[in-house]
Amino acid sequence: ILLFFLDRYNTILNQKELDIFVFNQMKIVEDELENQKKQALSLVLMFSQNQEIIRNLEENNPKELKKELLKLLNIISTYTKQNIDVQIHTKNLEVFTRSWEDKDFGENLASFREGLVKVKNTQKPFVSSELGKRFNIKAIAPIYDVNNNFLGSIEIIIDFKYLVYKLKNLGISSMILLENDYLNIATSYKDNKRIDSFTVLQNSFDNFEEKTLKEVLNSNKLFVESNSKIYSKIPLGSFGNKNAGVLLVCFEKFAKNLGLLEIPCQSDKIISRIE
């Protein structure tokens, strides 16, 4: 009887230790996601005060405004090694200009860009994992003229690949998944790999069993353990009061974090493993 209770006690202790470990690992994941959002928010607040951006929006000069954006982004990429996109919207939530392409000018985004509507209505900055024609981190801030009249808004867009890359350097494999229901909005992902009711947008798993990932996606547990690996997930974004996607993560049981490596970002290569 004594051996039975000792064994039971050890099992409880081991489970508690594992729960604490998983909690700490997931805290690292959440902190990295939050860091990406804070970076985007800081940049959009800075851009929203740029006088050249304000002047060209007010004077309806999208070409000159784009030149200013590209100049600023070139400076940022030199120091951060990140490719950041910027979009400017009119006060009616129409596309004014984009840093990454020259099309869709005048398109009204109100019907599927909840973040833009929120910023217009509240007149306050907002950052989130937001669904649009792409699913990524979007930080949005209002733009005002000298008389504090609302001219429109600006958004900084940061791809999830940088989050995936940073987590990989910490010994945490990750996968960004979008609900298939939203492929009619995020049409650029329609040819990506599917897992259950999700579409894979980014992936740093060296290998995986699809059966295990489906179990994790459909589980209500904090985590799932399989072959000495821990799998867990974090909901990403929302659209119409429903989660838009999932950040799925995997790490070795009781593995020590590697720490971020100070090496050039190779995140563009991450998604190639699922093509």
Image (cartoon, rainbow, N blue to C red):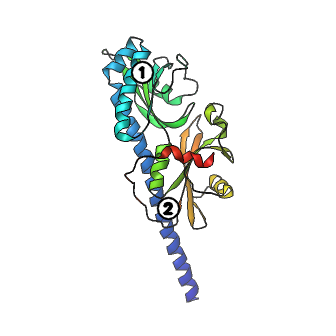
Is residue 42 in sight in this rendering?
Answer: no
Give whichever of discs 1 and 2 has the lower sequence position.
Answer: 2
Quadrant for the N terminus, please: bottom right
Q: Quadrant of residue 181 in the image?
A: top right
User: From the viewer's perspective, is residue 197 above or below residue 119?
Assistant: below
Task: Provide residue 122's location: percent of width, then percent of height.
Answer: 43, 26
Q: Which residue is identified by label 1? A: 66
Residues packed near mark 1 inside 10 Å, few (<14), some (14 to 19) or many (20 plus): many
Question: Left of 143 or right of it: where is 272?
Answer: right
**Pick the front one: 240 or 2:** 240
Task: Provide residue 145's location: percent of width, then percent of height.
Answer: 34, 16
User: From the viewer's perspective, is residue 63 above or below residue 9?
Assistant: above
Query: What kind of residue is marked 2?
Result: Val
Query: What kind of residue is marked 1?
Result: Lys
Q: Which label sits in the foreground, 1 or 2?
A: 1
Dot 2 lies on which element?
A: helix
Is residue 153 in sight in this rendering?
Answer: yes
| Alpha carbon distance from label 1 to label 2 | 45 Å
Q: Are marks 1 and 2 in contact (CB under 8 Å)?
A: no
**Pick the front one: 229 or 143:** 229
**Which mark is drawn over residue 22?**
2
Question: Left of 44 or right of it: where is 232?
Answer: right
Residues packed near mark 2 inside 10 Å, few (<14), some (14 to 19) or many (20 plus): many
User: From the viewer's perspective, is residue 223 above or below residue 178?
Assistant: below
Task: Provide residue 209's location: percent of width, then percent of height.
Answer: 66, 58
Quadrant for the C terminus, please: top right
User: From the viewer's perspective, is residue 270 above or below residue 120?
Assistant: below
